[in-house]
Image (spheres, rainbow, N blue to C red):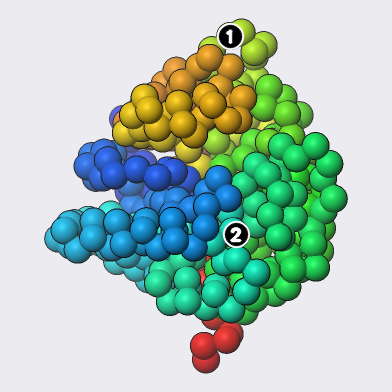
């Protein structure tokens, strides 16, 4: 079968349900409409932030949804994502990049779910009550509270996200879930070593796929780089990381989680990235993924590498849609 042309790849992209697994915390909403994204995961807590900080972001994004009700909707179910596509609207999915807003009372997760939370990581870079993050000196694995948290997430209908977890914590977590798991924005360590244990070894990638889960490929420069640290990565690095992930996990278990920080100001970058986590290597963005405008080029790049229409649709959002349909099924509220 002949490769899709660029025009055909863009058509496929525009026909797809496009689900962006990670956009961070941003208020640059217009770009998602311009790039024809169907839905995206917004971060309402990270960096070990607490309940109060999360509540402020819940209020901010609720206000944004009200102010833009004619073109944006809150995603609480898979049906909402499908409706967003049909009505040419943009769906906002609420997520946490840490479990710290829950505190030491997992019943707080019930409240967060009712407010719209649908995805949560156990850790950010550092230690939480659930386990150890990928930058901890010693990764001691999942805690007893973390085990309990996973059980409640499965019951309530919040998707478990293992991005940022230490490898031992992630391995342990896979033993305790009875629903599919995602890594919303993580890459394969075998080909993307510059960010150290922020990326995942093959064993964990396979374990996530075995749950029926999905791994979203991250476009952050040092996380997706397959080149020496002093060479700025480009779209080829991103696609190389994606193809390796497909090789290990399978085409049904890979999605997009670009993590582009679109709309970040210089002071925000200084506060959250340059000052704290040593991932940037001097590069702010990946060439070709400088912002959300680059997302459609992922579909074009896949077409150039020989991927067909159905494969591209799975990667651009179909795989995440399936997992959300399997994990956003609360038992506790029936």
Give the image quarter of residue 65.
bottom left
Q: N-terminal of the two: label 1 or label 2?
A: 2
Q: Residue furthest top?
A: 230
The answer to whether 201 appears left or right of 235 in the picture is right
Q: Is residue 158 above or below residue 100?
A: below
Secondary structure under the numbered disc 2 in the rendered image? loop
Q: CA distance from mark 1 to mark 2?
A: 34 Å
The one of 45 and 93 positioned closer to us in this rendering = 45
Residue 78 position, x and y percent, is 42, 68
Q: Which mark is residue 99?
A: 2
Residue at left 52%, top 88%? 333
**Circle 1 crowding by C-alpha within 10 Å: few under 14, some 14–19, many from 20:** some
The answer to whether 184 appears left or right of 211 in the picture is left
* Residue 70 seen in render: yes
Residue at left 23%, top 60%? 63
Residue at left 33%, top 46%? 37
Residue 311 position, x and y percent, is 52, 45
Residue bearing mark 1? 231
Residue at left 31%, top 57%? 61
Secondary structure under the numbered disc 1 in the rendered image? loop
The answer to whether 89 appears left or right of 180 in the picture is left
* Residue 91 seen in render: no
Residue 270 position, x and y percent, is 45, 26
The one of 140 and 30 positioned closer to us in this rendering = 140
Q: Is residue 180 above or below residue 195?
A: below
């Amino acid at each position: 079968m002949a490769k899709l042309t660029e025009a055909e790849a863009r058509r496929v992209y525009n026909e797809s349900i496009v689900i962006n697994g990670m956009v961070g915390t941003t208020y640059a909403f217009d770009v998602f409409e311009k790039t024809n994204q169907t839905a995206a995961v917004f971060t309402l807590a990270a960096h070990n932030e607490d309940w109060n900080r999360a509540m402020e972001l819940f209020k901010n994004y609720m206000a944004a949804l009200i102010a833009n009700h004619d073109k944006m909707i809150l995603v609480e179910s898979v049906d909402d994502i499908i409706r967003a596509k049909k009505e040419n609207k943009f769906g906002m999915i609420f997520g946490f990049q840490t479990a710290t807003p829950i505190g030491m009372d997992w019943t707080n997760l019930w409240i967060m779910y009712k407010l719209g939370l649908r995805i949560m990581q156990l850790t950010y870079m550092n230690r939480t009550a659930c386990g150890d993050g990928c930058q901890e000196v010693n990764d001691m694995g999942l805690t007893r509270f973390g085990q309990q948290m996973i059980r409640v997430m499965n019951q309530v209908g919040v998707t478990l996200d293992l991005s940022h977890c230490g490898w031992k914590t992630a391995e342990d977590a896979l033993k305790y879930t009875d629903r599919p798991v995602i890594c919303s924005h993580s890459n394969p360590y075998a080909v993307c070593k510059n960010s150290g244990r922020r990326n995942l070894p093959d064993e964990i990638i396979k374990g996530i796929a075995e749950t029926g889960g999905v791994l979203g490929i991250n476009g952050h420069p040092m996380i997706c780089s397959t080149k020496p640290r002093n060479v700025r990565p480009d779209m080829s690095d991103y696609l190389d990381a994606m193809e390796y992930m497909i090789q290990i996990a399978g085409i049904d278990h890979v999605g997009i989680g670009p993590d582009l920080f679109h709309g970040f100001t210089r002071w925000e970058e200084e506060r959250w990235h340059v000052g704290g986590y040593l991932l940037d290597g001097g590069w702010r963005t990946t060439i070709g993924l400088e912002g959300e405008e680059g997302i459609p080029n992922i579909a074009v790049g896949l077409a150039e590498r020989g991927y067909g229409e159905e494969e591209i649709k799975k990667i651009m959002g179909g795989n995440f849609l399936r997992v959300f349909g399997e994990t956003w099924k609360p038992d506790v509220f029936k």
